[in-house]
Image: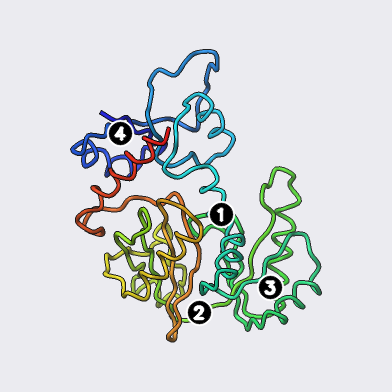
Amino acid sequence: MLRLAVTTSSETFERMRDPLAARGIDVGHLRAEQFALDLSTPPAREFDVGFVYPSRTMEGGVVAARHDIPWVNTRADILTSRNKAGVVAALSRANIPVLQSVYVSNPTDDESLMDAIEQAGLDYPVVVKPNSTTRGVGIAKAHDPDSLSGLVDHLNLVHDYRATGDKSYLVQEWLPDARDYRAMVLDGSVVGAVERRLPERARADGRWKHNVHRGAVAVGVTLPDRHRRLAEAVAAELDINYLGVDLLESDGRVVVSETNARPTIDDDTKYDEDFFDRLAALVERVAKKS
Protein backbone atom coordinates (compact mmCIF):
# COMPACT_ATOMS: atom_id res chain seq x y z
CA MET A 1 0.00 0.00 0.00
CA LEU A 2 1.28 3.46 -0.94
CA ARG A 3 2.18 5.55 2.13
CA LEU A 4 1.08 9.21 1.98
CA ALA A 5 2.44 11.78 4.45
CA VAL A 6 0.01 14.50 5.52
CA THR A 7 1.36 17.27 7.72
CA THR A 8 -2.00 18.48 9.05
CA SER A 9 -3.94 16.53 11.67
CA SER A 10 -7.13 18.57 11.27
CA GLU A 11 -10.17 18.15 9.00
CA THR A 12 -8.21 17.43 5.84
CA PHE A 13 -6.46 14.44 7.40
CA GLU A 14 -9.66 12.97 8.82
CA ARG A 15 -11.70 13.47 5.66
CA MET A 16 -9.16 11.95 3.28
CA ARG A 17 -7.93 9.00 5.35
CA ASP A 18 -10.73 6.46 4.82
CA PRO A 19 -11.56 7.33 1.17
CA LEU A 20 -7.90 7.02 0.16
CA ALA A 21 -7.42 3.86 2.22
CA ALA A 22 -10.23 2.33 0.16
CA ARG A 23 -8.15 3.18 -2.92
CA GLY A 24 -4.94 1.60 -1.70
CA ILE A 25 -3.28 4.64 -0.10
CA ASP A 26 -2.32 4.63 3.59
CA VAL A 27 -2.62 8.20 4.95
CA GLY A 28 -0.31 8.89 7.87
CA HIS A 29 0.32 12.01 9.92
CA LEU A 30 3.78 13.56 9.62
CA ARG A 31 4.32 16.13 12.33
CA ALA A 32 5.84 19.30 10.94
CA GLU A 33 5.58 21.81 13.80
CA GLN A 34 5.67 22.13 17.59
CA PHE A 35 8.21 19.39 18.21
CA ALA A 36 11.64 18.78 19.69
CA LEU A 37 13.55 16.40 17.48
CA ASP A 38 16.81 14.46 17.72
CA LEU A 39 18.14 14.94 14.22
CA SER A 40 20.56 12.02 14.52
CA THR A 41 17.72 9.52 14.97
CA PRO A 42 16.11 8.18 11.76
CA PRO A 43 12.36 8.78 11.32
CA ALA A 44 10.14 6.27 13.07
CA ARG A 45 7.91 5.95 10.01
CA GLU A 46 8.67 6.03 6.31
CA PHE A 47 6.55 7.46 3.50
CA ASP A 48 6.48 7.19 -0.28
CA VAL A 49 4.98 10.59 -1.10
CA GLY A 50 3.87 13.76 0.68
CA PHE A 51 0.58 15.56 0.19
CA VAL A 52 1.23 19.28 0.76
CA TYR A 53 4.59 20.69 1.83
CA PRO A 54 4.52 22.05 5.41
CA SER A 55 3.37 25.65 5.86
CA ARG A 56 6.34 26.57 8.05
CA THR A 57 9.24 26.64 5.63
CA MET A 58 12.02 26.13 8.20
CA GLU A 59 10.36 23.12 9.81
CA GLY A 60 9.42 21.96 6.32
CA GLY A 61 13.07 22.00 5.33
CA VAL A 62 13.92 19.71 8.25
CA VAL A 63 11.03 17.35 7.48
CA ALA A 64 11.95 17.25 3.79
CA ALA A 65 15.60 16.51 4.63
CA ARG A 66 14.60 13.57 6.82
CA HIS A 67 11.99 12.20 4.39
CA ASP A 68 13.33 12.22 0.84
CA ILE A 69 9.92 12.08 -0.85
CA PRO A 70 8.14 13.94 -3.66
CA TRP A 71 5.22 16.22 -2.77
CA VAL A 72 1.90 16.68 -4.55
CA ASN A 73 2.20 20.39 -3.75
CA THR A 74 5.85 21.34 -3.41
CA ARG A 75 7.64 24.00 -1.39
CA ALA A 76 7.71 26.19 -4.50
CA ASP A 77 3.94 25.77 -4.91
CA ILE A 78 3.30 26.89 -1.32
CA LEU A 79 5.55 29.94 -1.63
CA THR A 80 4.02 30.90 -4.99
CA SER A 81 0.46 30.82 -3.69
CA ARG A 82 1.31 32.51 -0.38
CA ASN A 83 2.69 35.55 -2.22
CA LYS A 84 -0.62 37.24 -3.07
CA ALA A 85 1.00 40.07 -5.00
CA GLY A 86 3.14 37.66 -6.98
CA VAL A 87 0.01 35.71 -7.95
CA VAL A 88 -1.78 38.91 -9.02
CA ALA A 89 1.23 39.94 -11.11
CA ALA A 90 1.58 36.54 -12.78
CA LEU A 91 -2.12 36.25 -13.59
CA SER A 92 -2.31 39.82 -14.84
CA ARG A 93 0.61 39.16 -17.18
CA ALA A 94 -1.31 36.15 -18.51
CA ASN A 95 -4.41 38.34 -19.10
CA ILE A 96 -6.38 36.54 -16.38
CA PRO A 97 -8.80 38.97 -14.66
CA VAL A 98 -7.74 39.98 -11.15
CA LEU A 99 -8.58 42.67 -8.63
CA GLN A 100 -7.04 46.05 -9.37
CA SER A 101 -4.12 46.12 -6.95
CA VAL A 102 -1.26 48.27 -5.74
CA TYR A 103 1.65 46.44 -4.13
CA VAL A 104 3.45 48.25 -1.33
CA SER A 105 6.90 47.28 -0.14
CA ASN A 106 6.90 48.73 3.35
CA PRO A 107 7.97 51.23 4.54
CA THR A 108 6.86 53.77 1.96
CA ASP A 109 5.71 57.36 2.36
CA ASP A 110 2.13 58.55 2.04
CA GLU A 111 2.80 60.57 -1.09
CA SER A 112 4.20 57.58 -3.02
CA LEU A 113 1.32 55.39 -1.90
CA MET A 114 -1.37 57.93 -2.83
CA ASP A 115 0.29 58.55 -6.20
CA ALA A 116 0.30 54.80 -6.94
CA ILE A 117 -3.37 54.48 -5.98
CA GLU A 118 -4.29 57.40 -8.23
CA GLN A 119 -2.23 55.98 -11.09
CA ALA A 120 -3.98 52.61 -10.71
CA GLY A 121 -7.37 54.30 -10.87
CA LEU A 122 -8.54 52.92 -7.53
CA ASP A 123 -11.62 54.54 -5.99
CA TYR A 124 -12.44 54.51 -2.29
CA PRO A 125 -13.21 52.45 -0.32
CA VAL A 126 -10.18 50.23 -0.82
CA VAL A 127 -9.12 47.01 0.87
CA VAL A 128 -5.75 46.76 2.63
CA LYS A 129 -4.47 43.18 2.72
CA PRO A 130 -1.18 41.82 4.13
CA ASN A 131 0.66 40.01 1.38
CA SER A 132 1.29 36.70 3.12
CA THR A 133 -1.43 36.12 5.73
CA THR A 134 -4.32 33.64 5.50
CA ARG A 135 -7.85 33.28 6.89
CA GLY A 136 -8.57 36.99 6.48
CA VAL A 137 -6.02 38.03 9.10
CA GLY A 138 -5.13 41.72 8.99
CA ILE A 139 -7.51 42.68 6.17
CA ALA A 140 -9.13 46.10 6.60
CA LYS A 141 -11.18 48.56 4.57
CA ALA A 142 -10.20 52.20 4.16
CA HIS A 143 -12.93 54.66 3.14
CA ASP A 144 -10.76 57.67 2.33
CA PRO A 145 -7.10 58.76 2.12
CA ASP A 146 -6.95 59.72 5.81
CA SER A 147 -8.18 56.31 7.03
CA LEU A 148 -5.80 54.61 4.60
CA SER A 149 -2.92 56.69 5.97
CA GLY A 150 -3.91 55.66 9.50
CA LEU A 151 -3.89 51.98 8.57
CA VAL A 152 -0.46 52.39 7.01
CA ASP A 153 0.77 54.05 10.21
CA HIS A 154 -0.44 51.01 12.13
CA LEU A 155 1.35 48.66 9.75
CA ASN A 156 4.54 50.69 10.11
CA LEU A 157 4.38 50.30 13.89
CA VAL A 158 3.88 46.54 13.61
CA HIS A 159 6.70 46.24 11.10
CA ASP A 160 9.13 47.98 13.45
CA TYR A 161 9.60 44.58 15.07
CA ARG A 162 12.48 42.87 13.33
CA ALA A 163 10.89 39.45 13.73
CA THR A 164 8.03 40.43 11.42
CA GLY A 165 8.47 38.48 8.20
CA ASP A 166 6.86 39.79 5.02
CA LYS A 167 6.32 43.52 5.58
CA SER A 168 4.58 44.17 2.27
CA TYR A 169 0.89 44.56 1.62
CA LEU A 170 -1.68 45.15 -1.10
CA VAL A 171 -4.18 47.92 -1.60
CA GLN A 172 -7.02 46.53 -3.72
CA GLU A 173 -10.30 47.66 -5.17
CA TRP A 174 -13.45 47.08 -3.15
CA LEU A 175 -16.21 45.16 -4.92
CA PRO A 176 -19.55 45.92 -3.24
CA ASP A 177 -22.01 43.06 -2.74
CA ALA A 178 -19.63 40.59 -4.36
CA ARG A 179 -20.40 36.88 -4.38
CA ASP A 180 -17.41 34.96 -3.01
CA TYR A 181 -16.51 31.53 -4.40
CA ARG A 182 -13.78 29.02 -3.64
CA ALA A 183 -13.12 26.64 -6.54
CA MET A 184 -11.10 23.50 -5.86
CA VAL A 185 -8.86 22.61 -8.79
CA LEU A 186 -7.31 19.15 -8.80
CA ASP A 187 -4.86 18.10 -11.49
CA GLY A 188 -6.09 20.80 -13.84
CA SER A 189 -9.86 20.40 -13.41
CA VAL A 190 -12.41 21.97 -11.08
CA VAL A 191 -13.71 19.16 -8.86
CA GLY A 192 -15.92 21.14 -6.52
CA ALA A 193 -16.80 24.60 -5.28
CA VAL A 194 -18.42 26.51 -2.46
CA GLU A 195 -19.94 29.94 -2.14
CA ARG A 196 -19.01 31.64 1.11
CA ARG A 197 -21.98 33.52 2.50
CA LEU A 198 -22.36 35.74 5.51
CA PRO A 199 -25.39 35.16 7.74
CA GLU A 200 -28.04 37.88 7.50
CA ARG A 201 -27.27 39.01 11.06
CA ALA A 202 -23.62 39.53 10.18
CA ARG A 203 -24.49 41.49 7.04
CA ALA A 204 -26.89 43.67 9.03
CA ASP A 205 -24.07 44.38 11.48
CA GLY A 206 -21.91 45.65 8.63
CA ARG A 207 -19.65 42.59 8.37
CA TRP A 208 -18.10 42.07 4.93
CA LYS A 209 -15.34 39.47 5.19
CA HIS A 210 -16.40 36.11 3.73
CA ASN A 211 -13.75 33.92 5.37
CA VAL A 212 -15.19 30.79 6.96
CA HIS A 213 -12.85 31.30 9.92
CA ARG A 214 -14.55 34.69 10.41
CA GLY A 215 -18.08 33.32 10.55
CA ALA A 216 -19.08 32.86 6.90
CA VAL A 217 -20.83 29.66 5.81
CA ALA A 218 -19.49 27.59 2.90
CA VAL A 219 -22.36 26.27 0.75
CA GLY A 220 -21.68 23.74 -2.00
CA VAL A 221 -22.49 25.11 -5.47
CA THR A 222 -22.13 24.19 -9.13
CA LEU A 223 -19.92 26.79 -10.73
CA PRO A 224 -20.94 28.36 -14.05
CA ASP A 225 -18.67 27.40 -16.95
CA ARG A 226 -17.15 30.88 -17.01
CA HIS A 227 -16.01 30.53 -13.41
CA ARG A 228 -14.72 26.99 -13.94
CA ARG A 229 -12.62 27.99 -16.94
CA LEU A 230 -11.15 30.90 -15.01
CA ALA A 231 -10.19 28.77 -12.00
CA GLU A 232 -8.62 26.14 -14.25
CA ALA A 233 -6.66 28.80 -16.11
CA VAL A 234 -5.27 30.06 -12.80
CA ALA A 235 -4.07 26.59 -11.75
CA ALA A 236 -2.52 26.04 -15.17
CA GLU A 237 -0.71 29.39 -15.13
CA LEU A 238 0.68 28.80 -11.62
CA ASP A 239 1.34 25.10 -12.40
CA ILE A 240 -0.01 23.86 -9.06
CA ASN A 241 -1.61 20.41 -8.81
CA TYR A 242 -4.00 21.03 -5.93
CA LEU A 243 -5.26 24.59 -5.60
CA GLY A 244 -8.05 26.58 -4.06
CA VAL A 245 -8.93 29.55 -6.27
CA ASP A 246 -10.96 32.38 -4.75
CA LEU A 247 -13.24 34.23 -7.17
CA LEU A 248 -15.30 37.37 -6.66
CA GLU A 249 -18.34 38.17 -8.83
CA SER A 250 -19.78 41.67 -8.87
CA ASP A 251 -21.69 43.72 -11.43
CA GLY A 252 -21.00 41.27 -14.26
CA ARG A 253 -17.28 40.90 -13.50
CA VAL A 254 -15.60 37.72 -12.27
CA VAL A 255 -12.07 38.21 -10.96
CA VAL A 256 -9.47 36.21 -9.05
CA SER A 257 -9.08 37.35 -5.47
CA GLU A 258 -6.30 35.03 -4.29
CA THR A 259 -5.22 31.38 -4.21
CA ASN A 260 -4.44 28.77 -1.58
CA ALA A 261 -2.06 25.86 -2.18
CA ARG A 262 -2.97 24.36 1.20
CA PRO A 263 -6.77 24.28 0.94
CA THR A 264 -8.78 22.33 3.50
CA ILE A 265 -10.66 19.31 2.15
CA ASP A 266 -14.32 19.95 2.90
CA ASP A 267 -17.05 17.33 3.34
CA ASP A 268 -17.46 15.19 0.23
CA THR A 269 -20.92 16.55 -0.63
CA LYS A 270 -19.15 19.67 -1.95
CA TYR A 271 -17.08 17.80 -4.52
CA ASP A 272 -17.68 15.79 -7.68
CA GLU A 273 -18.35 12.10 -7.12
CA ASP A 274 -14.96 11.11 -8.52
CA PHE A 275 -12.98 13.58 -6.37
CA PHE A 276 -11.15 10.95 -4.34
CA ASP A 277 -10.56 8.79 -7.42
CA ARG A 278 -8.81 11.75 -9.04
CA LEU A 279 -6.90 12.59 -5.87
CA ALA A 280 -5.67 9.01 -5.52
CA ALA A 281 -4.57 8.96 -9.16
CA LEU A 282 -2.63 12.21 -8.68
CA VAL A 283 -0.90 10.92 -5.53
CA GLU A 284 0.09 7.71 -7.33
CA ARG A 285 1.44 9.63 -10.32
CA VAL A 286 3.57 11.93 -8.15
CA ALA A 287 4.89 8.94 -6.18
CA LYS A 288 6.00 7.23 -9.39
CA LYS A 289 8.16 10.23 -10.31
CA SER A 290 10.47 9.62 -7.35
Query: Which one is earlier in the sequence, the residue at label 1 or at label 2?
Result: 1
The residue depicted at 44 percent of the width and 35 percent of the height is 70
**Label 3 amino acid?**
Leu
Query: Which one is earlier in the sequence, the residue at label 2 or at label 4?
Result: 4
Mark 3 or 2: the one toward you: 2
Using the rendered view, name the quadrant where residue 130 is placed. bottom right
**Label 2 amino acid?**
Leu
Query: Which one is earlier in the sequence, the residue at label 1 or at label 4?
Result: 4
Q: Which quarter of the figure is the C terminus placed in?
A: top left
How many labels were placed on the picture? 4
Report the Cα–Cα distance between label 2 and label 4.
41 Å
The residue depicted at 74 percent of the width and 64 percent of the height is 153
Report the Cα–Cα distance between label 1 and label 3.
19 Å
| Relative height, residue 143 to residue 279 (above, below) | below
Using the rendered view, name the quadrant where residue 194 is placed. bottom left
Report the residue marked by disc 2.
175
132 to the left or right of 283: right
Mark 2 or 4: the one toward you: 4
Report the residue marked by disc 1.
133
Mark 4 or 3: the one toward you: 4
Q: Percent x, y for residue 191? A: 30, 59
276 to the left or right of 46: left
**Label 4 amino acid?**
Val
Report the residue marked by disc 3.
148
Marks 1 and 3: CB-CB under 8 Å? no
